[in-house]
Amino acid sequence: MEQEHNTSHRYLLTGLILGLAIGLVISLLIAPVVNADALPHELSEEAKADYREKIALAYAADQDLERAISRLELLHDPQPVQALISQAQNMLARGESEAISRAVADLATQLDALLNPGNQIP
């Protein structure tokens, strides 16, 4: 009778381990959760660069500098003007679209003129 009692616990433990393993496989490989609601400052550097491009293109279309600034603030860049300038230079160096890199550079120019009146972008 004691042996039957031990075997029933083994089946319970085996079932628990198999259930956890199957649950992990499903949640990590088959149907992983995608966080579609990530905040801009949580993005990877590549995604942040894409976000800056979209901000610059939106600014080029509507010339709403306040809105562009509020969007850039979501990235939490310590120096947003410098980030835009270096991104525009990197885009040109990689041979990406000149129109988009110009839009990024124009946004950097306008932002610098607003934040630092009298200073010129190097």
Image: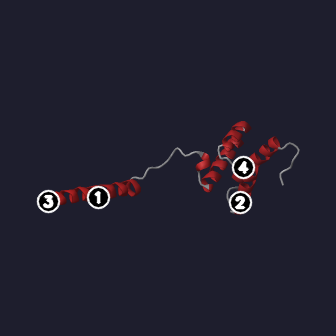
For marks 2 and 1 on the same chain, the one whose residue lies earlier in the sequence = 1
What number is the disc on residue 18? 1
Q: CA distance from mark 2 to mark 3?
A: 73 Å
Q: Amino acid at mark 2?
A: Asn
Pinpoint residue 71: horizontal percent, then vertical percent.
66, 41
Residue under circle 3? 2
Read off the residue under disc 4. Answer: 78
Q: Nearer the viewer, mark 2 or mark 1?
A: 1
Amino acid type for the residue under numbered disc 3: Glu
| Residue 83 position within the rendered picture, expressed as x and y whole percent measured from the top left | 72, 53
Distance from the alpha carbon under mark 4 to that under mark 1: 48 Å
Callout 1: SS: helix
Residue under numbered circle 2: 90
Residue 3 location, quadrant: bottom left
Which is more N-terminal, label 4 or label 3? 3
x and y percent of residue 65 in the render?
Answer: 73, 38
- Do residues under tags 4 and 1 come within 8 Å of each other at their CB atoms? no
Please tell me whether mark 4 or mark 2 is closer to you in this view: 4
* CA distance for labels 2 and 1: 50 Å
Q: Disc 3 vs disc 4: Cβ atoms closer than 8 Å?
A: no
